[in-house]
Image (cartoon, rainbow, N blue to C red):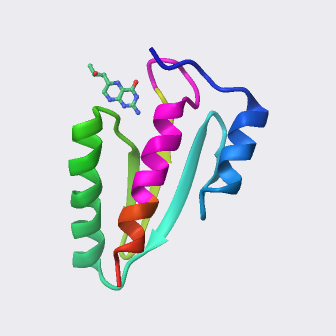
């Protein structure tokens, strides 16, 4: 089972995760899409990978701005699962033209 990471390890990982920052006991990133339908489509793409990973972000959608917040609820903090999901979200974001 994933364990909660040390703060220093999270900080190191965040240096390589463009757009992500610590948000309490989670990490989060806000991504702006070209339109509301594109924001919803992006959320759907994230939902697919999250389901495959069985690790789900909290998602806040406001018009074209989507904020993903990742923490491992069962552990009450940030684990490698959250870092991996953040990386995957960034990879998907990079595919948005
Ligand atoms: C039963 C299921 O495996 C668990 O509830 C999973 C689902 N997705 C999850 N997602 C996140 N972010 N944290 C969890 O602890 C978690 N647990």
Q: Farthest top residue?
A: 1
Front residue of this view, candidates 32 and 83:
83
Q: Is residue 61 rendered magenta in the image? A: no
Tell me which residue sits at (34%, 74%) in the image. 95
Name the spot of residue 24 as percent of width and height, x first. Answer: 66, 38
State which quarter of the image contains the C terminus.
Answer: bottom left
Q: Is residue 80 rendered magenta in the image? A: yes
Magenta segment boundaries in residue numbering? 73-89
Name the quarter showing ligand 1. Answer: top left
Q: Can I make out residue 17 in this image? A: yes
Tell me which residue sits at (29%, 55%) in the image. 46
Q: In the rendered view, tell whether residue 77 sits above or below residue 46.
A: above
Q: In the rendered view, tell whether residue 16 sits above or below residue 37.
A: above
Front residue of this view, candidates 28 and 91:
91
Name the spot of residue 43 as percent of width and height, x first. Answer: 28, 60
Tell me which residue sits at (26%, 77%) in the image. 38
Front residue of this view, candidates 95 and 64:
95
Relative to 27, 84 lies left or right: left
Front residue of this view, candidates 18 and 39:
18
Q: In the rendered view, tell whether residue 58 sits above or below residue 74.
A: below
Tell me which residue sits at (53%, 32%) in the image. 80
Relative to 65, 11 lies left or right: right
State which quarter of the image contains the N terminus.
Answer: top left
């Amino acid at each position: 089972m994933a364990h909660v990471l040390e703060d220093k390890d999270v900080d190191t990982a965040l240096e390589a995760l463009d757009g992500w920052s610590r948000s309490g006991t989670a990490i989060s990133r806000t991504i702006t899409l070209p339109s509301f339908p594109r924001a919803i489509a992006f959320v759907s793409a994230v939902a697919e990978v999250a389901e495959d990973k069985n690790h789900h972000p909290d998602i806040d959608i406001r018009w074209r701005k989507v904020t993903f917040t990742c923490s491992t609820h069962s552990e009450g903090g940030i684990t490698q699962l959250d870092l991996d999901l953040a990386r995957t979200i960034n990879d998907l974001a990079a595919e948005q033209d």
